[in-house]
Image: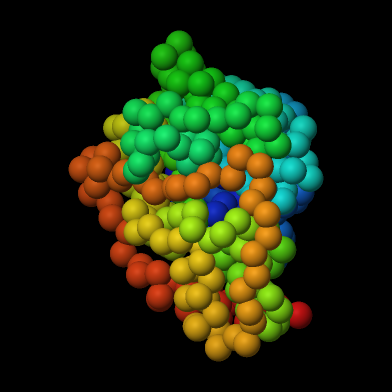
Amino acid sequence: MKTVLITGGAGFIGSHLCDLFLKKGYRVLCLDNFITGSKASIEEHLSDKNFALVEHNITKPIHLSEDVDIILHFASPASPVDYLNYPIQTLKVGSLGTHNSLGLAKAKGARFLLASTSEVYGDPLVHPQTEEYWGNVNPVGPRGVYDEAKRFAEAITMAYHRVHKVDTKIVRIFNTYGPRMRLADGRAIPNFITQALKDNPITIYGDGSQTRSFCYVTDLIDGLFRLVNSGLNDPVNIGNPHELTLKELAEHIKRLTGSRSRIVFKPLPKDDPRQRQPDITLARENLKWLPKVPLEEGLSSTIEWFRKHIK
């Protein structure tokens, strides 16, 4: 039985990775310090003999006696609310946490996958974004703590690959949604659904013309599994290229929830990107991966999960 270590394993994406690897017959070590993760997301696995919870802050060295075959580094605050509340922790997990995780991969001879982000492209001047694009990032703006943490994480990951010959992978994740997102996550879909279900005003920052591309979580997880088992070492975009405006998204959610909410507009936060759409040619050609879940279906599933958990 192979062992996979998932840092940030109690987070939104991390918990879905725990599900997948357990189903595929792996032993899963879930590492989390619960700054933004939730024990409720992994509670069903706590009694599984092939699952172990490691409560640890990855910015401090980790010592594991058992062998590890794969490390998936997903620990990090990932929403603007979180990384604005925890700016230094965000920088530390992207730098020290990635360094510690890579060091463990080197010591164990494990494959390593870094969860990077479309935020490395910043407010892009190229559309759609290909992996060759270097980005347009403000390093000293309020979002810089997340953007630059991930850009550093990519740089040190590639350094470990080139210098220490660690078999590394880098995924640049575009907006992903689905069950287990936190109600107060702060990103567009959780905000809009929570507000719509409560019949509160649906808040759009800016005029709503800025675009995003939303990928359902099961599609992302499938892409991640294909990537970690591939021969690719350079960054790969994983996301749904279907692009829509935030105003269109809000209207979809209002209709699907049957909400009486009105849509209101507030000032756009500093450095908020105007466009975001992945070019997934690399994933399509090399991983044979394409997203399958239509937006309507994914939103309906997510809304039902929120409906059950909202207070």
Can residue 209 be seen in this snapshot? yes
Residues 76 and 200: in front is: 200
Q: How is the image coloured?
A: rainbow
The answer to whether residue 197 is above or below residue 54 is below
Q: Residue at x 40, y 69 (%)?
A: 295
* Marker count (numbered): 0
Q: Position of residue 16 (x, y in %)?
A: 52, 59
Which residue is at the front of the view, 294 or 24? 294
**Image height of 156 relative to 239, above or below:** above
Give percent across and percent down for residue 37: 70, 54
Residue 161 located left or right of residue 257: left
Q: Residue at x 77, y 32 (%)?
A: 88
Q: Residue furthest left?
A: 285
* Quadrant of the image containing the C terminus: bottom right
Residue 42: in sight, yes or no?
A: no
In the image, residue 139 lies at what x, y percent? 63, 26
Q: Residue 39: image x %, image y %?
A: 71, 60
Position above or below: 191 against 258 = above
264 vs 94, nearest the viewer: 264
Left or right of 260 on screen, residue 121: left
Answer with left or right where residue 274 lies relative to residue 91: left
Q: Quadrant of residue 219?
A: bottom left
Up/down of 4 relative to 292, above or below: above
Residue at image point 57% right, 52% down: 14
Q: Residue furthest top?
A: 163
Q: Identify the residue shown where x is 72% and y is 48%.
A: 82
